[in-house]
Image (spheres, rainbow, N blue to C red):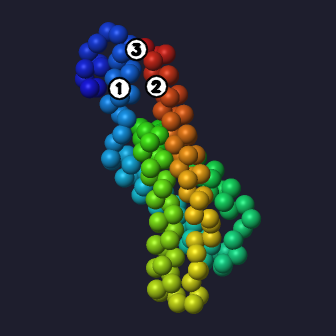
Amino acid sequence: MHNEADSVNDREWAMGTRLAAGRFGWRGAGVSALVFAGLGVSMVLLIQFLWQHDTPDGLWSGVMVGSGVVGALLGLRRVGPLEAGAGALAFLPGAWLTVVALQATLGDAAPRDPGMDDQGVTVLAVIAACAAGSIRSLTALRRSAAT
């Protein structure tokens, strides 16, 4: 589809074809899931070892901002909004798997939960999808304005 879009003189059709070719890529969703699972793992490890079970007040706000930054970076890497949002759903399983691993190794000294509500992961998915979509739209507009 990219070759076909490059060979046509109709810019609007070519831009639509390029966007359709990049709608959903499993590689992009996998990369996004890996990044967000790593974010969940790092948050639990920070709470456990750096803050020693004392969760800072602004942690969730920071995670939401981080989700937007990660979504924007994924958008720059040509990951679509659907892939970024779907990958963001891996945040909670990554956090819970880290809690389970810590409970297996540390016993009673391990945390009982990841330190956030389960519903919060949907907020992260929406933020990541919006950030990736915004960046993808801006880069597409910039490319079409340059030609």
At x 55% / y 40%, what residue is drawn? 131
Q: Which tag, 2 or 1, sits closer to the chain's start?
A: 1
How far, Cα to Cα, is label 2 from label 3?
11 Å
Q: Amino acid at mark 2?
A: Ala
Residue denoted by label 1: 18
| Residue 16: quarter of image | top left
Question: Residues at badges 2 and 1 in contact (C-beta under 8 Å)?
Answer: yes
Residue denoted by label 2: 140
Q: Which tag, 2 or 3, sits closer to the chain's start?
A: 3
Regarding mark 1 in the picture, which secondary structure is present there? helix
Question: Residues at badges 3 and 1 in contact (C-beta under 8 Å)?
Answer: no
Q: Amino acid at mark 3?
A: Glu
Is residue 71 at least partly visible in the picture? no
Q: Residues within 10 Å of mark 3 (few under 14, many from 20)?
A: few
Drawn side of residue 116 relative to residue 40, left or right: right
Residue denoted by label 3: 12
At x 47% / y 40%, what residue is drawn? 81
Rendering coords of residue 117 (x, y %): 62, 65
Is residue 23 at least partly visible in the picture? yes
At x 36% / y 40%, what residue is drawn? 24
Q: Residues within 10 Å of mark 1 (few under 14, many from 20)?
A: some
Q: Amino acid at mark 1?
A: Arg
Regarding mark 2 in the picture, which secondary structure is present there? helix
Rendering coords of residue 22 (x, y %): 35, 34
Regarding mark 3 in the picture, which secondary structure is present there? helix
Q: Residue furthest top?
A: 9
Nearer the viewer's eye, disc 2 or disc 3? 3
How far, Cα to Cα, is label 3 from label 1?
10 Å
Q: Is residue 9 above or below residue 55?
A: above
At x 42% / y 57%, what residue is drawn? 34
